[in-house]
Amino acid sequence: MLLDNLIQNLIILKNDGIDYIPVNKETLDKIEKLEIEVRNCSQCHLSETRKNIVFGEGDVNAELMFVGEAPGANEDEQGKPFVGEAGKLLTRIITAMNLTREKVYIANILKCRPPENRNPLPEEINKCIAYLMAQINIINPKIICCLGKISTQTLLGTKEPIHRIRGKIFDFNGIKIVPTYHPSHLLHHPENKKYVWNDMQLIMKLLRNSSGDNPISE
């Protein structure tokens, strides 16, 4: 799966006129080893009902990482994150940022789908969070965009509602976190798209400033 994604990404880059991109073999080896570990995971009961684990995908050297909460039915079927209607909206958001899914990294708090797409339970998060932390440690992005309440509250260790903390900048072991609404929320509340776009503009500004080592005041 990881090799297939890498080949696909390289083809896309070549079509964009980029013939060479440095690949850190050590990083790839670590991610591949972690993915194998996740595929063999049976720490919680979700392993009994999943069709596929949804490990994550994208550029293992990405500066920007999106973190959602858990796979849905489409993701469970395909083994890929954000491929349903919410995923299509996320793709449009990423495109509007002048990026592609292949140039960011997308993952979830949980790697298996909760039944009926219910919210992850605390015990499920506790069992699975180490895998996400390992992904973050390996990829080492400059910015993490938390999509929705569960992702935000889990990584920041807070109970604050998403509408109060979205669009703010938080530090996470040297990585900047910017929370925003989950794309599935926007499908039901399109009036909040303007806030998400404001958050994406903040992220783009952070990315530009990090490239120039020009810090932004929080």
Image (tube, rainbow, N blue to C red):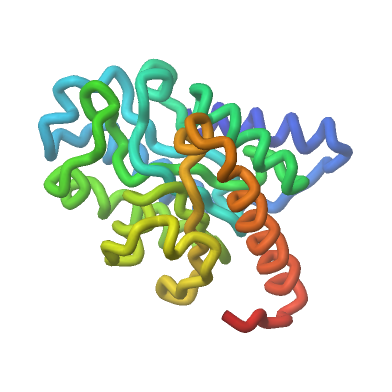
At x 34%, y 66%, the residue is 156
Q: In the rendered image of this protein, does residue 213 appear above or below residue 191?
A: below
Residue 122: percent from the left, percent from the top?
16, 48
143 horizontally vs 80: left or right: right
Residue, x 57% and y 80% (percent of image)?
218
Task: Identify which residue, 83 or 217, lies in the foreground.
Answer: 217
Q: How many marks?
A: 0
Whether residue 145 sits left or right of residue 151 in the image: it is right
* Image coordinates for residue 2, horizontal then vertical, percent: 49, 34
User: What residue do we see at 17% from left, 29% from top?
Assistant: 46
Q: Nearer the viewer, residue 126 or 18?
A: 126
Q: Which residue is farthest front?
A: 191
State whether residue 24 appears in this view: no
Q: What residue is drawn where x is 12% and y is 47%?
A: 123
Q: Is residue 11 left or right of residue 15?
A: left
Q: Is residue 95 visible?
A: yes
* 190 and 73: which is toward the camera: 190
Where is residue 137? Give x, y as percent.
41, 62
Above-or-below relation of 179 to 58? below
Q: Position of residue 52 (x, y in %)?
A: 32, 22
Q: Reply above or below: 88 against 211.
A: above
